[in-house]
């Protein structure tokens, strides 16, 4: 990457400073206006970017680990393969941001706006996404082991092939989400939300406790609520999708 000078202005347009990229490690950029700034590969480790405007900024492969991005505007920002592990993104606006293959292990995304964000193959291991808006987010092949998704809005999200083992899905809104049919944890949570009697609740919980088997082996053929589970899951299908059991019925 070629080093460039970047002008940093306040949100009202006043010039604050000129800096020489790519080294902005631990820089104080609170409320800085970096709209469409080219920060490709820039070292922003532990930088203070609280409430900064990074709308459509290019942060491709940038180093943002440990950075303070609380309340930052990252709408449509390019964060492909960016390192954000341990970053504080509480309440940040990441709507429609490109986070393809980004490293977000342990990142704090509590109540962040990730509406229609592109998170394919992103590493979100043990990230805190409690209360986050993930409506329509693309989480295909995302790694969410141990992530906290409690109360998150995942309506219409693409969870196909997402890894959700040990993730906290309590109270998530999964209506219209595209499923990962290999995730017993995800199937269990959605069935629990749809259950209306004790037998259905117990069936849903038992599915979540079985980590090696997959549908249809998860439920005994003579289980009284097997057909309920089957018909409920059919309602989650998208496009030409079929349940694994359909090939055997």
Image (cartoon, rainbow, N blue to C red):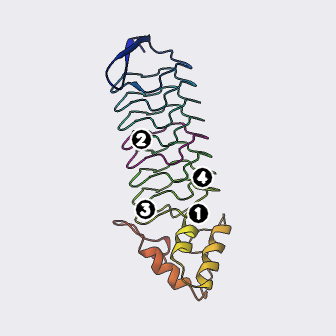
- Residue occupied by mark 1: 170
Q: CA distance from mark 2 to mark 1?
A: 23 Å
Q: Position of residue 64 (x, y in %)?
A: 53, 28
Specify start and end residues of the magenta stretch as a single range: 95-117
Q: Is residue 102 left or right of residue 199?
A: left
Residue 134 in sight in this render: yes
Dot 4: within a 10 Å radius of its alpha carbon, few (fewer than 14), some, or many (20 or more) residues? many
Q: CA distance from mark 4 to mark 2?
A: 18 Å
**Residue in the foreground of this view, choosing between 125 and 152:** 152
Q: Position of residue 158 (x, y in %)?
A: 42, 56
Labels 4 and 2: the sequence-earlier one: 2
Labels 3 and 2: the sequence-earlier one: 2
Where 139 falls versus 247 (above or below)? Answer: above
Q: Which mark is residue 177?
A: 3
Q: Which mark is residue 148?
A: 4
Q: Main secondary structure of the magenta part?
A: loop
Q: CA distance from mark 3 to mark 1?
A: 15 Å
Labels 4 and 1: the sequence-earlier one: 4
């Amino acid at each position: 990457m070629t080093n460039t000078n970047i002008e940093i202005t306040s949100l009202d347009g006043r010039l604050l400073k000129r800096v020489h990229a790519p080294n902005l490690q631990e820089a104080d950029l609170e409320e800085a206006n970096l709209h469409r700034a080219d920060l490709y590969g820039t070292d922003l480790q532990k930088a203070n970017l609280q409430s900064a405007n990074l709308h459509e900024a290019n942060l491709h492969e940038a180093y943002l680990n440990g950075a303070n991005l609380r309340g930052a505007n990252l709408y449509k920002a390019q964060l492909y393969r960016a390192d954000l592990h341990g970053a504080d993104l509480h309440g940040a606006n990441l709507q429609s941001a490109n986070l393809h293959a980004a490293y977000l292990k342990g990142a704090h995304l509590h109540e962040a706006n990730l509406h229609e964000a592109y998170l394919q193959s992103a590493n979100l291991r043990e990230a805190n996404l409690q209360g986050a808006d993930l409506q329509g987010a693309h989480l295909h092949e995302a790694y969410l082991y141990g992530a906290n998704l409690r109360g998150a809005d995942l309506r219409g999200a693409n969870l196909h092939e997402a890894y959700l083992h040990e993730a906290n899905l309590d109270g998530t809104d999964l209506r219209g989400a595209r499923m990962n049919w290999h995730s017993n944890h995800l199937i269990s949570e959605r069935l629990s939300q749809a259950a209306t009697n004790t037998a259905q609740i117990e069936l849903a919980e038992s599915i979540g406790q079985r980590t090696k088997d997959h549908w249809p082996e998860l439920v005994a053929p003579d289980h009284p609520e097997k057909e309920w589970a089957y018909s409920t899951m059919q309602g989650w299908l998208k496009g030409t999708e079929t349940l694994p059991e359909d090939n055997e019925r």
